[in-house]
Amino acid sequence: LGAGCLGPAKSLYPHTAGQEAQTLYVVSHGWHTGLIVPREAVPHNLWPAAQDFAPAHYIEVGWGDDGFYRAPKITTGVTLKALFWPSPSVLHLVAVSDPRTEFAASNIVQVELSARGFAALCGFIGRTHACGPDGRPVWLAPGIYGDSAFYRARGKYYLPKTCNHWTARTLRSAGCPITPIYCVTAGNVLFQTKRFGREVPVVRARE
C-alpha cells in the first residue's frame, strides 16, 4: 500500500518558505472524519455556506449519508443501507471556537497548506454543496451538536465512497500526498495524514 501512495501535487503542496500558509485540522470521531478550517480565511466566492457561521473562528465540515447522518437512532438496517445502497448525501457544518478543547475526546492532526492549496480545498468543498435555483447552498436542518447545520450535498454515499473517502479526496484536492482509494476507514485517513501532518495534543477543559 505504501508503494502505491500518491505523492504531493507540487504546484499546490507543500507551501514553501516565504509563502503564506494556512492551517487546517483533520479530526477523527472514531468511525467518521471531518475537516476543521479557519472560517475567516475561506474565500467567499469558493464556499459561500461558510459565511453562515460568522463569527466562528473555525468550521468543521463532514460529508456523509443523509439517512445515517440524520437518523434519530442508528440501527443495523440504517447502517447496511448506507453502506450498500447508493443514497443521497449531506454536508454537516459546525461552528468551532478551539478544536483542541471542543474535540478533546477526538484524534486531531494539523496540516499546513499553501495558499493555493487551501483555495483549491475550499473550492472542492463549495462544489460538494448542492445549490438551489437561487444559486445558494441548500440548507436542510439543524445539525447534530453545537451551532451546526445540514446542507444538501452532491454525490451518492455507498461503500467505498464513505465520509472518510471524501475527507481524503478533499485533502488531495489541496495537493496533499494522500491516496483516497485506501481511505475507507477513519484509521487509514489518520495513518496517511500523520505522514505529512502533525498530531495535535488535546487540551482538557478545567473542572
Image (tube, rainbow, N blue to C red):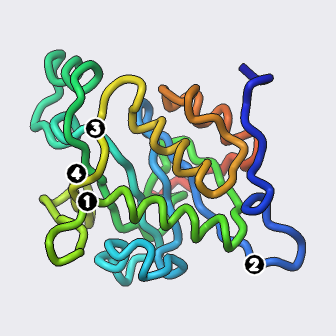
Q: Amino acid at mark 1?
A: Ala
Q: Residue at x 59, y 61 (%)?
A: 24
Q: Amino acid at mark 4?
A: Ile
Label 4, on which residue? Answer: 144
Tag 3, which secondary structure?
A: strand
- Distance (Cα) linking label 4 and label 2: 34 Å
- Density class for disc 1 (Cα within 10 Å; few <14, some 14-19, many ≥20) is some
- Which residue is more in the foreground, 16 or 142? 16
On the image, numbered disc 1 is attached to which residue? 130
- Name the image quarter holding the N terminus: top right
Q: Earlier in the sequence, mark 3 or mark 4?
A: 4
Could you tell me the amino acid type at mark 3?
Lys
Image quarter where the C terminus lies is bottom left
Q: Quadrant of residue 47?
A: bottom left
Q: CA distance from mark 2 to mark 1?
A: 31 Å
Residue in the image at 55% along x and 42% along y? 168
Q: Which residue is mark 2?
A: 20
Label 3, label 4: how far apart the Cα atoms are: 21 Å
